[in-house]
Image (cartoon, helix red, strand yellow):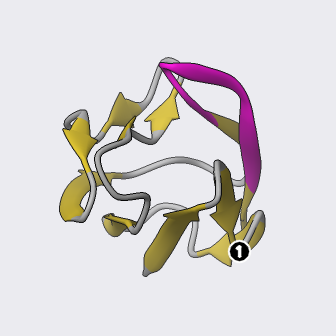
Amino acid sequence: MTIRAVALAYSPGSATIAAGVPVTITLQNSDASVAHDLTLPGVGKTDLCAGPCNSSVTFTVPAGTYSFVCSTHADMTGQLIAR
C-alpha cells in the first residue's frame, strides 16, 4: 500500500489493511525538499526523507484502529483500520 505525503498532508488520510498478516506501507513523499516520515506509535515508522523520495515500513498488527503521524509535522495525521 502507498500513502502519499503532499502539501503537508497524507493521501489517503485513512486506509484499511489486513489484520494479523505482514503489511508494507510505502510513504511516497512528493513535497520537494520537505522531510516527512510515517510513524505508527508503538508499531513502526518509515525513514525520514526529504522529497521527492520513498520509504517503506513492514509490520503486523491485530485488528483495531491505529493513528499515524509525521514526526516533524504533528498536524500531519492519518488512520489505519486493521480488519
User: In the displayed structure, does residue 40 sit left or right of residue 80?
Assistant: left
Q: Name the one closer to the observer, 23 or 7.
A: 7
Relative to 40, residue 5 above or below: below
Q: Quadrant of the N terminus?
A: bottom left
Residue 78 sits above or below residue 35 on the image: below
Q: Tell me the quadrant of the picture where the C terminus can be found.
A: bottom right
Q: Secondary structure at mark 1?
A: loop
Residue shown at 40% from the left, 68% from the top? 30
The image shows residue 50 at horizontal and vertical percentages of 24, 44
Q: Taking 74 as reference, is 18 left or right?
A: left
In the image, is residue 27 part of the stretch drawn in magenta? no
Q: Position of residue 8 (x, y in %)?
A: 64, 48
**Is 78 contained in the magenta span?**
yes
Asked if one can make out residue 36 in the rendered structure from this viewpoint, the answer is: no
The three-letter amino acid code for the residue at tag 1 is Pro
Give the magenta-colored segment's residue range.
69-79
Residue 3 shows in the view = yes
In the figure, residue 27 lies in which quadrant? Answer: bottom left
Q: Residue at the location (27% across, 56% down)?
A: 51
Q: Residue at x 19, y 62 (%)?
A: 53
**15 with respect to 2 (left or right):** right
The residue under label 1 is 12
